[in-house]
């Protein structure tokens, strides 16, 4: 996969997550933590997502099957169901609407992928292996990189604060 690195300003976007399970929960939480408004659509929504909705007013849960009109004005669409045909429909609809789409089970089908990341203050480091290793492997690679660079992080943050 070729790529163009991009960091989205979460507080300025709306996102749609289609799926109500563990992967959808992880994706929705990351988006919420970035400041995004998140709509989750799924026929069944798990308890962790329901609990998150109590604490995150920017999280809207819609318990029903996905329809083609659900893309709406979402800037970022994430297909995170365990049904390949639903993910394919979400992907096709998002691409037709000109939206960024991440496909959890087949990242190569989407227009963007998420990267393993680490944040320290205003410093954000993202790592991708272009889909060549598992997300778990990418997170391990990010942890190794951050651990190796940890001594430099305070210096980098100070430099950012000075130059910024």
Image (cartoon, grey):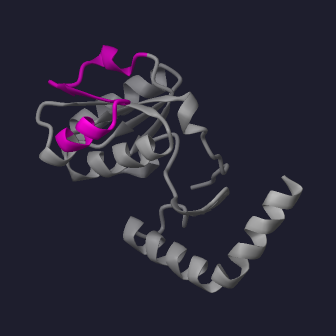
Residue farthest to the right, as pictured:
163
Q: Residue at 40%, 65% (x, y): give it.
A: 135
- From the viewer's perspective, is residue 86 above or below residue 81? above
Residue 105 picture location, percent across and down: 32, 51
In x, y percent, where is residue 139?
45, 70
Residue 105 visible, this orientation:
no
> Would you say 114 lies left or right of 47 here?
right
Residue range (magenta): 50-72
Q: In the displayed structure, does residue 69 sit left or right of residue 102?
A: left
- Along the line of sight, which residue is nearer the eye, 23 or 38? 38
- Res. 75 in view: yes
Q: Is residue 55 magenta?
A: yes
Q: Toward which corner of the image does residue 122 lie, by quadrant?
A: bottom right
Which residue shows up at 47% across the image and 70% down it? 138
Question: Which residue appears at 55% of the width and 33% of the height?
Answer: 11
Vertical order, 42 against 108 (above or below): above
Quadrant containing the N terminus in the rendered view: bottom right
């Amino acid at each position: 996969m070729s790529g163009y690195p991009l960091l989205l300003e979460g507080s300025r976007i709306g996102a749609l997550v289609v799926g109500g399970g563990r992967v959808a929960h992880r994706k929705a939480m990351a988006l919420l933590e970035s400041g995004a408004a998140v709509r989750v659509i799924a026929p069944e929504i798990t308890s962790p997502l329901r609990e998150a909705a109590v604490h995150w007013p920017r999280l809207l849960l819609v318990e029903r099957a996905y329809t083609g009109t659900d893309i709406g004005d979402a800037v970022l669409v994430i297909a995170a169901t365990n049904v390949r045909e639903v993910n394919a429909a979400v992907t096709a609809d998002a691409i037709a609407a000109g939206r960024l789409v991440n496909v959890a089970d087949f990242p190569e089908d989407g227009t963007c992928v998420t990267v393993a990341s680490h944040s320290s203050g205003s410093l954000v480091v993202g790592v991708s292996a272009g889909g060549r290793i598992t997300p778990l492997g990418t997170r391990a690679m990010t942890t190794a990189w951050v651990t190796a660079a940890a001594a430099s992080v305070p210096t980098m943050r100070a430099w950012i604060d000075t130059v910024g």
